[in-house]
Amino acid sequence: MRGDGREMEFAVSARLGDLKFVVDELERLNARPESPFVGKLDMSNVALAGHSLGGLTALLGIEQEPRFRAGIFIDGVVPDTFSETEKPVFILTAGREHRSNQECRLWDNLRGPRFAVNLKGADHVTPSDLVWFAKGAIKTGTMGPEKTVAAIRDYVAAFLDTNLRSEPLDPLLTGPSVEYPDAAVTTRSQSLCGADSSAHSEVHGFEPDDPMLQTPQAWAPKM
C-alpha cells in the first residue's frame, strides 16, 4: 500500500463533512418560507456522484448518510471495505482490462439496483474536463470525445431516471448499445467479474501516483 493513509483519511473525512453540510443547507433552503427554493427541492431523491477520490467519497457517503439515496462511482478509488447496500449504485470505469478483487467484492455487496459500464480504450481522466482541455491527448476509444461524453451523460441520466424518478427502464440499461459501442455493459443480474476469480487483479481499481488519490487502507471516515 503506497501513500499516507492518514492523509487519505483526512481528505475523505473533509469531503464527507462537506457533503453533510451541503445536504443540511439544502434542507434548510427547502424549508424556510423566505427561501426562493422553498418546497422546490426533492430532498427524498438525492444522489451522489464522484470521480477518482470523489468516487470513494460517493460510496462512503451513501453508506454513512441515509439522505443520499443513490451513488454514481466514476472510475474511483475502491474502498477496502464496503457494507452491503440496497441503494442504487452505478459503477463507471475507464479502460479496465481486468477487474480488481476489490471491485468484484464491491459489486457483490450491491444488493439493490446496480449497473456497470466500462468505457473501452478510455483514460482515467476521460470523464473529466481534461477531455476538452487536452483534446486529442486523452484516450476516448473509438467513439471520440463528443460521443464518449454523451455516453457518460446518457448512462448516468438513464440510471437515475429509472431508480430515483421511477421512469420506465431505459434500453441503455438492458445491454450493449449500438449507439455507444465502446461501452461494455454489466446489468444487475450479471457478474462483473465472471466465475474465474484467478483472473482478478490485486490492484485496487484506479491507483495513481499521487498518494492523495491512492487506495485507502481499511478505514471508513465518519460523517
Image (cartoon, grey):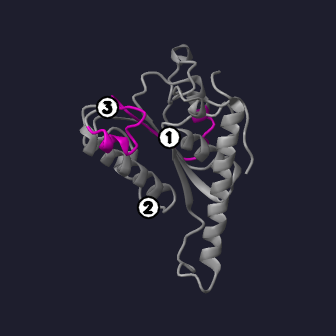
Give the secondary structure at mark 2.
loop
Amino acid residing under circle 3: Lys
Look at mark 3 in the image and give the residue it sits on. 139
- Mark 2 residue type: Glu
Q: Is residue 96 above or below residue 36?
A: above
Comes first in the chain, label 1 or label 2: 2
Query: How dense is the environment of label 1, judged by Cα within 10 Å: few (below 14), some, or many (20 and up)?
Result: some
Q: Residues within 10 Å of mark 2 (few under 14, many from 20)?
A: few
Query: Which one is earlier in the sequence, the residue at label 2 or at label 3?
Result: 3
Q: Position of residue 213 (x, y in %)?
A: 56, 33
Closer to the eye: label 2 or 3:
3
Mark 1 or mark 3: name the one nearer the start of the chain. 3
Query: Residue 219, position in %: x, y?
Result: 73, 35
Could you say whether the residue bearing mark 3 is in a helix, strand or loop?
loop
Q: Nearer the viewer, residue 12 or 200?
A: 12
Give whichever of 2, 183 is nearer the camera. 2
Quarter that holds the N terminus: top right
Q: In the image, which is nearer the foreground, mark 1 or mark 3?
A: 3
Question: How far apart are labels 1 and 3 at the CA level?
Answer: 28 Å
Q: Is residue 72 left or right of residue 118?
A: right
Q: Residue at x 55, y 13 (%)?
A: 198
Look at the image and tell me whether residue 103 can be seen. Answer: yes
Q: Which residues are magenta?
A: 106-135
| Tags 2 and 3 touching, CB below 8 Å | no
Q: Which mark is residue 188?
A: 1
Q: Position of residue 68 (x, y in %)?
A: 62, 56
Left or right of 49, for residue 9: right
Distance from label 1 to label 2 (Cα)? 17 Å
Residue placed under numbered mark 2 in the picture: 167
Residue type marked 1: Arg
* 112 falls in the magenta region: yes
